[in-house]
Amino acid sequence: MFGEVRAEVASRGFAFVPAGDMSDLLAAHNFDVTGFAASWNDLGEDRFMADGGRYRRRRHATFDVMPDGIVRRPHQPHFQATDFNPLNGGIERWFDPVRAEVAAHPLMQAVLATGRDLFDALTPVDQRPAAWFVEVHQFRIEASANGAGQPTPEGAHRDGVDWVLVMLLTRENIVSGVTTISNLDHEQLGSFTLTETFDTAIVDDSRVFHGVTAVEPLDPARPAYRDVLVVTFKRGGEGAVGR
C-alpha cells in the first residue's frame, strides 16, 4: 500500500487514501484511536477569521520530525503570507496549543511518522531535510441553520509548504465537503469526499491547488460539524497552512 500511495502522489500530485488503507499505513507505527477523536470537542474558537465567520474551531502545534524521532517545538504563532492566504494571511495568529496528551497520543505519533516515511520517500535524497518542520492543526468546521461552514474560506489554494496530509476524524450530520484538486492552471484534476474516519487526502503542495466545498447540516436542529487533522511538512524554517 505504501508503494501505491507513493506512486499515485508522484504521478498525479495528490492521492485519496481510503480509511482502510490509511489504517494499514498507520498500523506500521502502532496506534490506538481511543480518546483521540474526542479531543476535537475541546477546541477554541478561531478568532482570526477575516470574513467574520464563527464556524471554525482549532488547535495548533509544531514539531521537528526526523528519522530518529519526533520533537515538539515550543508553542509559536502560525503565519502565512497573503500570497498563499489573501483572506487570513499577513499576520501572526496565535491559536490554542494542541494539548500535550493529544500531541503525545500514539495515533498522532503514528500520523507524524507515517508522513515522514512517505514524504521522505517522495523527496529526492539530495533535497531531503535532516528534520521536517511540521505543523499540526486540529480543525472543527461547524454548520447550522444560520449558515454553512467553510473548510477553506480562502477557496482553492496552496499552503506554501512541501506536503499536506488531511485526515478525517468525524463527519456529523453534514452534507457536501467535497475536496477538489486542480493543477497550477486551475484545471480540475479530481475530486472526492472524506466520509469515513481515517479517509485521507495527500497533496504535493508545489504541484496542485486544493479546496473543500462548504458543509451544511442535514438536520438543522442537531449539531453538525466536520473534524479533520491537517498536517503539513516543510523543509526547514517556518511553515504555513491556510485553512
Image (cartoon, helix red, strand yellow):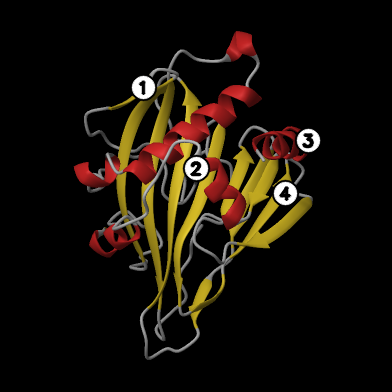
Q: Is residue 241 visible?
A: no
Dot 3 or dot 2, earlier in sequence: 3
The residue at the point 52 percent across, 54 percent down is: 154
- Residues at marks 3 and 4, CA–CA distance in whole angstroms: 14 Å
Residue type at the position of mark 1: Gly
The mark closer to the camera, 3 or 4, is: 3
- Does 163 sit above or below residue 224? above
Question: Which mark is in front, 2 or 4?
Answer: 2
Along the horizontal axis of the image, is 159 left or right of 103? right
- For label 4, the crowd category at 10 Å Cα-Cα, with few meaning under 14, some 14 to 19 and many 20 or more, is many
For the residue pair 93 and 226, the one nearer the viewer reads as 226
Task: For marks 2 and 1, give the CA distance.
Answer: 16 Å
Q: Position of residue 4 (x, y in %)?
A: 72, 39
Mark 2 / mark 4, whichever is N-terminal: 2
| Residue type pointed to by label 4 | Ser
Question: In front of the other: label 3 or label 1?
Answer: 1
Residue that label 2 marks: 26
Residue annotated with mark 1: 69
Q: CA distance from mark 3 to mark 2?
A: 22 Å
Determine which residue is flagged by label 4.
182
Residue 222: image location, x then y, percent:
37, 86
Residue 89 pos. (x, y %): 42, 43
- Labels 1 and 4 touching (C-beta < 8 A): no
Residue occupying image coordinates x 71% and y 59%: 191
Q: Is residue 48 left or right of residue 153?
A: left
